[in-house]
């Protein structure tokens, strides 16, 4: 065949027509994709199940740990409560023991004082013998401005015989701006004009007195006058002081 001048020539190739081949290739591709998707899904499913199992086991472990911690916490709270209760009991017991010891020490001191007093009265070994104004104690009462008093007279002699006489007690203080002395009979209405004593060894003169309004007590003036020709007048002052003389 003669070539046409001026036009481009193409080579032609004959290809066999096979429509089933394309269908087979497409089918194989789809089967591959389906298999790959199935395997991927199964793998992910297995991985998820395995991870879920791990989470379940960890959850069980945490729940057991929480239960153990709660149990330990309850035990610790109980122990703390017992320790606090024991501390309170120990504290109260200690205070009670301390109070008992102080009370016993006070009783022992009082007994020693009484023993010394009785020894001085019964077995005198001092030069200052005869009638003595020993002490004056003052204590508060339940009523305001009312007080209990106790005056102790003793006789220190080698041979005890009755001594008797009378006592004059005046309370000295300040009323307003002036000093004032008030006889005990005006403060204690149960007392008469004179306070008599008669004893061999000792005698307590006690009662209750009421302070006048506006009167500030300072001291007691006690005068004891025994009867007899050789008797001597005794005087002694006591500062106003509660629970002691």
Image (cartoon, grey):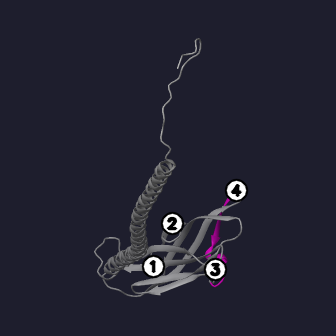
Residue at image mark 2: 237
Residue 215 is covered by the magenta coloring: no
Of 137 and 41, which appears nearest the observer?
A: 41
Q: Nearer the viewer, residue 155 or 173?
A: 173
* Mark nearer the N terminus (1 vs 4): 1
Judge the density around disc 3: few (<14), some (14-19), many (≥20) Cα neighbours within 10 Å. some
Q: Using residue 185 as the reference point, say whether residue 48 is left or right of it.
A: left
Q: Position of residue 65 (x, y in %)?
A: 39, 68
Q: Identify the mark nearer the N-term, 1 or 3.
A: 1
User: Quick one: 27 or 224, which is closer to the camera?
Assistant: 27
Q: Gap between marks 2 and 3, in whole Å? A: 19 Å
Residue visible at 44% across and 62% down in the picture: 45
Q: Residues within 10 Å of mark 2 (few under 14, many from 20)?
A: some
Where's residue 183, x and y in %? 63, 73
Q: Decide: is 13 above or below 21.
A: above
In the rendered image, which residue does mark 1 sit on? 153
User: Start and end of the magenta stretch?
Assistant: 178-190
């Amino acid at each position: 065949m003669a070539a046409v001048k001026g036009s481009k020539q193409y080579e032609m190739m004959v290809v066999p027509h096979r429509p089933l081949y394309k269908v087979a290739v497409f089918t194989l591709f789809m089967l591959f994709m389906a298999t790959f998707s199935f395997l991927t899904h199964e793998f992910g499913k297995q991985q998820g199940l395995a991870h879920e199992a791990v989470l379940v086991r960890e959850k069980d472990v945490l729940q057991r740990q929480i239960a153990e911690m709660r149990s330990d916490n309850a035990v610790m709270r109980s122990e703390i409560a017992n320790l606090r209760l024991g501390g309170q009991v120990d504290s109260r017991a200690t205070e009670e023991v301390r109070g008992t010891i102080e009370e016993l020490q006070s009783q022992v001191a009082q007994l020693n004082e009484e023993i010394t007093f009785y020894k001085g009265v019964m077995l005198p070994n001092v030069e200052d013998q005869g009638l003595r104004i020993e002490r004056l104690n003052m204590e508060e009462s339940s009523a305001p401005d009312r007080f209990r008093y106790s005056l102790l007279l003793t006789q220190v002699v080698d041979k005890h015989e009755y001594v008797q006489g009378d006592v004059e007690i005046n309370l000295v203080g300040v009323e307003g701006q002036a000093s004032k002395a008030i006889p005990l009979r005006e403060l204690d209405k149960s007392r008469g004009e004179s306070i008599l004593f008669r004893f061999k060894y000792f005698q307590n003169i006690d009662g209750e007195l009421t302070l006048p309004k506006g009167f500030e007590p300072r001291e007691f003036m006690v005068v004891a006058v025994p009867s007899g020709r050789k008797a001597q007048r005794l005087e002694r002052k006591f500062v106003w002081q509660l629970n002691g003389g």
